[in-house]
Image: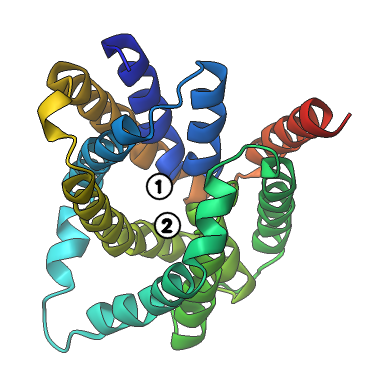
Amino acid sequence: MVWWQAMVLGLVQGLTEFLPVSSSGHLILTRELMGLNDGSSFLLFDVMAHVGTLVAVVIVLYKPILELFKKPYKNLVMLVVATIPAVVVGFTCKDVIEEYFSTAKYLCFFFAFTAVIMLVSEIVAKHNAKPKELSWGGTVAMGLMQGIGVFPGVSRSGSTIFGGTVAGTDSKKIATFSFLMSLPVIGGSLLLSIIDVAQAGTLGSVDWFSMVIGAATAFASGYIAVRVMLKLIAKANYKWFSLYLGIIAILTFSFYFI
């Protein structure tokens, strides 16, 4: 992986990590289009890119993050509860998930699923005359949907938006909590990536310049994406993401199955 490829992947990672289009699915497609198949480089790149996106969301949401640690800690407990499904699915379905991450062949079906739930989210949100505060029901719904979002092609943010919207939660509350939910998931992915890199023993042959470029690009694009999505979620404006994902799903299906 050379520096410009790292920049492209960092841009894709940062934007799609927070837009409801699936960062994992887009990274798999981008790597295949660029002919990249060096798994050891991807492990470290994932670490650096996750650092960039993690810093971006912390900077944007530093106030809600600080509020998590104020008594009576209700929001913090909600965040922990909402994270449990993703952890359970991640560990129990690890082999299946890794199999899907190894190929772009089945991304079309996951992209199509995300397109449908985003369209449904907009329809439901527009017809919700009395949106409510984030409740335990909304928390569990968003957590369960985040568990589904661990599969490549299924958007984590899109899934949590869908869960909160169907539960009748106010769009602004969904926006903030959805991105707060990304913190433990990104942090956990970062930790696992660091462990994988350590076990692979590839640090000595790393092009650190390219990795730093990728991380910086992921941070910059991630920061913009978080800002944009906070506004779009508050307005429940998802149909264009649904249309985009529908087109990508058709294209990838045509490429791999026709």
> How many marks on residues?
2
Residues tagged 1 and 2 counted as in contact (Cβ below 8 A)? yes
Percent x, y of residue 184: 27, 64
Q: Quadrant of the N terminus?
A: top left
Callout 2, which amino acid? Answer: Ala
Height in image: 207 above or below 38? above
Q: Is residue 236 visible?
A: no
Percent x, y of residue 15: 41, 33
Determine whether the residue tagged by mark 2 lies in a helix, strand or loop: helix
Q: Quadrant of residue 248?
A: top right
Q: Quadrant of the C terminus?
A: top right
Callout 1, which amino acid? Answer: Leu
Percent x, y of residue 253: 80, 34
Going by the image, does 174 lie left or right of 102? left
Q: Is residue 32 visible?
A: yes
Going by the image, does 103 lie left or right of 189? right
Residue under label 1, please give it: 230
Q: Who's the residue at 74% across and 36% down the image?
A: 249
Neighbor class of circle 1 (other Cα within 10 Å; few <14, some 14-19, many 20+) is many
Q: Who's the residue at 63% across and 38% down the image?
A: 241
